[in-house]
Image (tube, grey):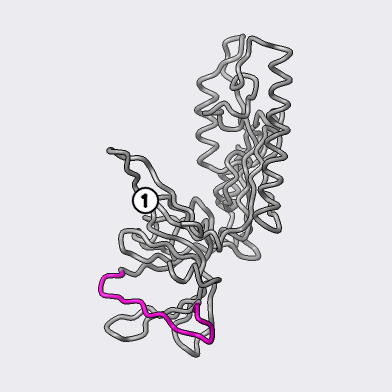
Amino acid sequence: FNDALLYTTPVQSGMYKLNNMLSLAGMKNELNIESVERSFILSASSATERDEWLEAISKSIEEYTKKRITFNPSKSLEEADPEKQEDSPLGSKAPIWIPDTRATMCMICTSEFTLTWRRHHCRACGKIVCQACSSNKHSLDYMKNQPARVCDHCFRELQKQDSQYTPKSGSPVNHKSPSSALSTVLQSIPSGRKQKKIPAALKEVSANTEDSTMSGYLHRSKGSKKPWKHLWFVIKNKVLYTYAASEDVAALESQPLLGFTVSEVKGENSESRVFHLLHKNTLFYIFKADDPHSAQK
């Protein structure tokens, strides 16, 4: 394969289990930059430009690490480069923020974002959450112990970390923000929160699940005269899940694929980007991929 990324895990007898297959044609040329102070995503104009930046940055990091070893020969490469140390405590490094366009709902409570119910980023994990799920503040090491907005999940985890570490005086460390005392009151105030009752089955698989058969963006129409919608789709356990965005934690709908067939729609060119999903020879959905290779998957 030279047009798809295969995510696999090794199994016995030297074989590999296929966890996911993603079309390279549908991928953006992105590069993650992670550091203690700041982490972010860069988008290049092409894969070549992305690889050039990756090589240049990696080379600079390697040269810097070697210089540190020169001044302290007793340190290994892993010790000289703190960025390579695994299991960094939560809050010790700046997280990569998930782009706003990749989540249409709170990644904790699934409430829908609107003009009045806005997105917030957790400064500890980078997830997109609503104000009700991020009403607490906590000091973070990478921000020089300044209090910052964190989601409820990270707030509980950071409190656990606090209980494990004590200062020299022996008294427990208190990183809790003064504003956290008001969080309960603020959460009780009526707001523009728009939360739908989502069936449990639609919460079982998130849009970014790693063990799906396939996932990616497609344009979908429910009929020849119906409008096209750009949606994220995931196939897992022979079920087609539909999402509004690629990082949503709950699906819009799910459709078992048992009994369905796929029919390619030939266009003027030899390669088509359109295909039909049929059930007992009846048109169910029309899909359109960004390129012929993605459609063939």
Relative side of 148 to 197, left or right: right
Task: Answer whether residue 86 is magenta in the image.
Answer: no
* Residue at left offset 44%, top offset 49%: 7
Extreme residue toward the bottom, this view? 225
Q: Position of residue 88 (x, y in %)?
A: 56, 28
Q: Position of residue 9 (x, y in %)?
A: 38, 43
> Is residue 110 visible from the viewing direction of this image?
no
Quadrant where the C terminus lies? bottom left
* Residue at left offset 66%, top offset 34%: 178
How packed mark 1 is, by other alpha carbons closer than 10 Å (few <14, some 14-19, many 20 or more), is: some
Q: Quadrant of residue 155?
A: top right
Q: Position of residue 142 (x, y in %)?
A: 68, 31
Q: Quadrant of residue 40?
A: top right
Q: Position of residue 192 (x, y in %)?
A: 59, 63
* Residue at left offset 51%, top offset 20%: 164
The residue indicated by pointer 1 is 18
Which residues lie in the magenta part? 257-272
> Is residue 47 visible from the viewing direction of this image?
yes
Badge 1 marks a residue whose secondary structure is: strand
In this view, 15 is above or below 45 = above
In this view, 44 is above or below 52 = below
* Residue at left offset 69%, top offset 11%: 72
Q: What amino acid is found at the position of numbered circle 1 in the picture? A: Leu
